[in-house]
Image (spheres, rainbow, N blue to C red):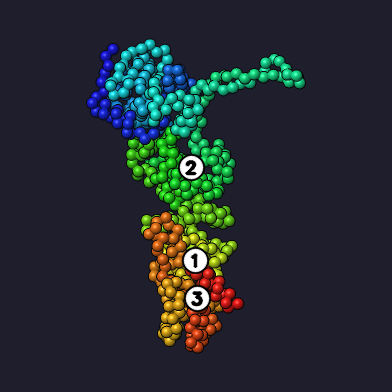
Amino acid sequence: MAKKQFKAESKRLLDLMINSIYTNKEIFLREIISNASDAIDKLCYLSLTDENVGMSRDDFKIRVELDKENRTITVIDNGIGMDKAEAENNLGIIAKSGSNQFKQDLDSEEEAAEDVSIIGQFGVGFYSAFMVSQKVTVETRKYGEEMGVKWESSGVDGYTVKEIEKPEVGTRVIMHLKEDTDEEVFSSYLEVWKIKALIKKYSDYVRWPIEMDVEHQERKETGEVDDQGNPKYEYEMVTATETMNSMVPIWQRSKAEVSDEDCAEWYKEKFHEQKDPIVTLRVNAEGTISYKAMLFVPGQEPMDRFSEDKKAGITLYSNGVMIMEKCPDLVHEYFDFVKGVVDSPDLSLNISREILQHTRQLHVIGNSLEKKIKSELMKMMNDDRPKYQQFFRSFGVDIKAGICDEYGRYKDFLKDLLIFYTSEEHQVTLQEYVDNMPESQQKIYYASSDSVRHAMDLPQCEEVRARGYEIIYLDLAIDQMVLEQLRDHDGKTFCNVMTDDLGFDTEEDKKAAEEQNEENKELLDYLKESLGERVAKVRLTNKLVSKPSALSTEGPITLEMERYFRASPSEEMQKIRAVRVLEINANHHAFEAIKEAYEADDKEKAANYVKILAAAAELVSGVELQEPGEFVSLISDLL
């Protein structure tokens, strides 16, 4: 029998198929099973109008057989099959898709078959078998034909086609595996556990049962008893046919069939979680792009959350076949904590089915999902604030990072999800803070430190609280960047109590403060000189109430931003420092003591006093103590 050659274009494409298009060899089984599923879909649809098919829906199945001795994997279906012409067209011309033609024929009919979903529409998936096979044999017989067809090829060298006797309708794809190499152990695909794992991973939700013979031990009585009169048993290996796939995924079932408790159990099994999800979102969207989704917000922060190996995204399916295990394009990184699945029949897949041909469909689905996720989170915030606070402790940093991302592009969408501390026990949204403001308050005041407790203790907070105004306390380095990105809320600007004008002083007050600093310029210059590089400036202030000193900054870099940069992996970022200013309470007795010592020409005492005030300001601001040894010695001398 003469061997036929692929067309030159097909030969080059086949070589590309085998070596380049697919990034993962193990998907070959997904592709062959998907083709088998399509063949069954076609015959099942035909059986609705042709009573001669003689098969009910329960009769259709896919079978996988492993032969270690002959190194073959065989996938068998009882679908519609192919005649000789179709075998040559569909298998001899790469990218000629029988499934695509079938769908076009349906669409051209007056009565479109909306219930028929065809997985493969490119005609190239079949050739993924050559990634693991040195030869592929296809034995097929089309429904309504008396003779079968055998198509066989070893790859780019061509193929043969001949008629054969085949008693049953359907197709057998026999893959003769390549020999093992140092790089690839192809014989691993002959192991039952491996094939089971691949079916579970990629084809678990193919609508037709995928069967395979599985060998296991079975215990049976021997008819004898031991010395204590207990029956004796022996074990023998028994082979039984098992269905490998679930067929109908949980997200395709109605809420009447599957409870939230069932979803939670599936989530814990699927994603290896210990705790129930804090949110379960089930979506059945119909329209220009139809899809079903089942999404979960974890009940606890994952252990591998910041692992470099962790891939962001949601698992993407098309008609129950897994396309991408982690699809990062469905939701933005600020919702990276969401887990679950999305299944759509309307995706335009590329020829490898590993990525999408058009991202517009993903954007439509993703935008819809993000709105639904936000809606569920807002509902939790309003109905169960303690539960929302639990969520925000785990994943609030994702929301905050999203506000800062891309120069604040998503801030308007995300800002309503933020909550902030106004005490160690109480958290509010920005809108709640503004709604609670007295009429006399014009700004949203905030204070930053490494904890809420430390932020509350900042000396600059005293005057704000004395006027009856609440303060938002920030305990993460990113928090201040979030507020600077937002700029304001509901017309109220954010005010950093450590660096900004609180808005309390009149022009006369400001003028008096300038004069006071000018009058004490010589003393302040000496105090700055005594502190060296620890601060850029020493000045007097009337903003402090009971505390003698405080540390503030000048310029765009604050102490919290400095702490954020120092934690960066970038050495250049770690070098960024805030311009520090030591503010001394002009009305505190500590300043009077410094002034008296300086005027009495005891400048050393004045210098020691200001060093103590500087260290105290550093401690209360939550920054690293610059001279801890010196501070301890000075305190000991005073005592």
Amino acid at pointer 3: Lys
**Which residue is denoted by mark 3 in the rendering?**
611
Task: Report whether 46 appears left or right of 92.
Answer: right
Task: Report whether 62 appears left or right of 232.
Answer: left
Reply above or below: 148 against 23. above
Residue that protrudes farthest toward the right in the picture? 228
Which residue is pictured at 33% across the width and 29% down the height? 18
Q: Mark 3 to mark 1: distance in Å?
A: 15 Å
| Observer-nearest of 81 and 24 | 24
Amino acid at pointer 1: Glu
Callout 3 environment at 10 Å: few (<14), some (14 to 19), or many (20+)?
Answer: many
Which residue is pictured at 57% across the width and 75% down the height? 635
- Label 3 SS: helix
**Closer to viewer: mark 3 or mark 2:** 3
- Label 2 SS: strand
Reply above or below: 612 against 186. below
Which residue is pictured at 46% across the width and 62% down the height? 563
**Which residue is denoted by mark 1 in the rendering?**
624
Task: Report whether 257 appears left or right of 333.
Answer: right
Of the image marks 2 and 1, the number of the one nearer the N terminus:
2
Point out the image quarter for the N terminus. top left
The picture places residue 73, in percent across and down from the top left corner, at 43, 22
Callout 2 environment at 10 Å: few (<14), some (14 to 19), or many (20+)?
Answer: many
Is residue 292 visible in the rendered image? The answer is yes
| Observer-nearest of 392 and 221 | 221
Do residues under tags 2 and 1 come within 8 Å of each other at their CB atoms?
no
**Which residue is denoted by mark 2 in the rendering?**
340
| Observer-nearest of 27 and 169 | 27
Q: Mark 2 to mark 1: distance in Å?
A: 43 Å
The picture places residue 316, in percent across and down from the top left corner, at 43, 39
Which residue is pictured at 58% across the width and 78% down the height? 638
